[in-house]
Amino acid sequence: MITCHNLCEELEQWAPLEFQAAYDNSGLIVGDPGMEVHGVMVALDVTEEVILEAVSKGCNFVLTHHPIIFKGLKQLIGKTEVERCVILALRHNVALYAAHTNLDSIHGGVSHALAEALTVKNLSILAPREDLLFTLSVFTPLESTDAVAEALFSAGAGRVGQYDECHFSLDGKGTFRPLKGSNPALGKQGERSVVLEQWQHFVVSQERRGAVQTAMELSHPYEVVAHTWTSMENSRSDVGFAVVGDLEQAMCWDDFIKHVKSVLGLTALRHSPKVHDEVKRIALCGGAGVDLLPLAIRSGAQAFITADISYHRYFEAKGALVMMDVGHWESEQFTIQLLADYIRRKFPNFAILTTTSLTNPMITV
Ligand SMILES: [Zn+2]
């Protein structure tokens, strides 16, 4: 039996919820985590058509990129599309799950899928995240330092790039006085204790923080563990938004436009004026990525493919690169297959369908 919880866990191993942006609402949005899942329907957006299609095909878990509930819901009376979808999902006992900015942030995520479809290779993350690392500093009596370090390493502390078990420590002297009601591992109530301690420091990534805190509490001998979490601004090259890479061979401008239109199935394409006769290095951001334009320019890209670009923003690209608006749905269309393929690999003997309904709410003629 596969439960809703099993699916969520597997998806979050791949695209940890900790990677979502502060404004986002990724994860399980509607549904009982303990419910047995009979089949998964994958789409880019939740719509009433997608939910009804899932029900008609025996799927009770709808997996999408965009979260159905983004801002708070104050009523559920069917007044808006969002309210109607939530009511419909609840009525048919269908779970709704979104992998949104967390899926944008991982290697192999939304922008990678777009780049691969356009045969852009040697990909690296364009905007590495700078809000996902912490330092944990903990005071440990000398005789317990190895055990605590071991437990924290096992929980994922001390992983930096291609290294693990990274740790720094300083020896020193600590004092404390256990008060009434305490149950000290060392010393006596009412008396000051002086202990030889080590000040241990570990780098911890956001997604490991909970497990590392638990490991510290379980492995440390002190009743109250003196420790500090400090947020770092160091960037992570393995997590972040958008990608930059190279076409195998430079393409002349007209051929490149044809290539983009044909791969993405576009009838029209809006872009800023041509800068180079040929393009080779391409920056890409599935969805609304115009704020990353300065990084795209700095990366040396000759073209920046994204969506949702407003009129005035085109001036910012002038003379530096060609910024292209390929459409929001169009830039993220490969995410449907990306999600379906991942679930299929993890649950090979399970019904995983992709929607036949075109959820794009924007029509270009
Ligand atoms: Zn999007």
Image (spheres, rainbow, N blue to C red):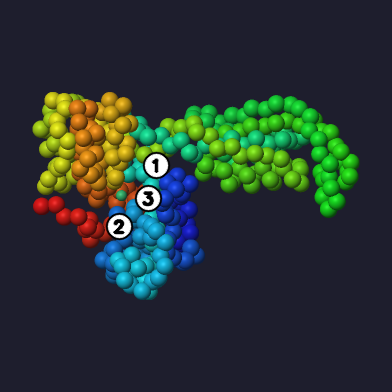
What is the C-alpha distance between the residues marked 1 and 3?
Answer: 9 Å
Q: Name the residue under label 3.
A: 100
Q: What residue type is labelled 1?
A: Ser
The structure residue drawn at horizontal position 12% and vertical position 45%, both measured from the top left corner, is 268
Q: Nearer the viewer, residue 151 or 313?
A: 313
Quarter of the rendering containing residue 274: top left
Q: Up-down: is 50 above or below 232?
A: below
Q: What residue type is labelled 3?
A: His
Left or right of residue 323, residue 267 in this image: left
Is 324 rendered above or below residue 47?
Answer: above
Q: Is residue 249 left or right of residue 244?
A: left
Mark toward the start of the polypeptide (2 vs 3) = 2
Q: What element carries label 3?
A: loop
Q: How far apart are marks 2 and 3 (CA)?
A: 10 Å
Residue at numbered disc 1:
105
| Mark 3 within 8 Å of ligand 1, using the beta carbon | yes
Q: Earlier in the sequence, mark 2 or mark 1?
A: 2
Residue that carries the numbered disc 2 in the rendered image: 45
Q: Can residue 328 be seen in this view?
A: yes
Q: Residue at x 29, y 51 (%)?
A: 336
Residue at disc 1, secondary structure? helix
Label 2: which secondary element: loop
Displayed quadrant of residue 70: bottom left
**Image quadrant where residue 215 sits:** top right
Give coordinates of residue 51: x percent, y percent.
Answer: 31, 66
The kind of residue on which mark 2 rests is: Asp
**Where is residue 155 shown, x and y percent of the image?**
59, 41
Please report whichever mark, 1 or 3, sits nearer to the chain's N-terminal start. Answer: 3
Judged left or right of residue 216, residue 55 is left
Q: Where is residue 20 in the image (x, y as percent from the top left)?
A: 43, 47
Residue at horizontal 30 percent and vertical 41 percent from the top: 289
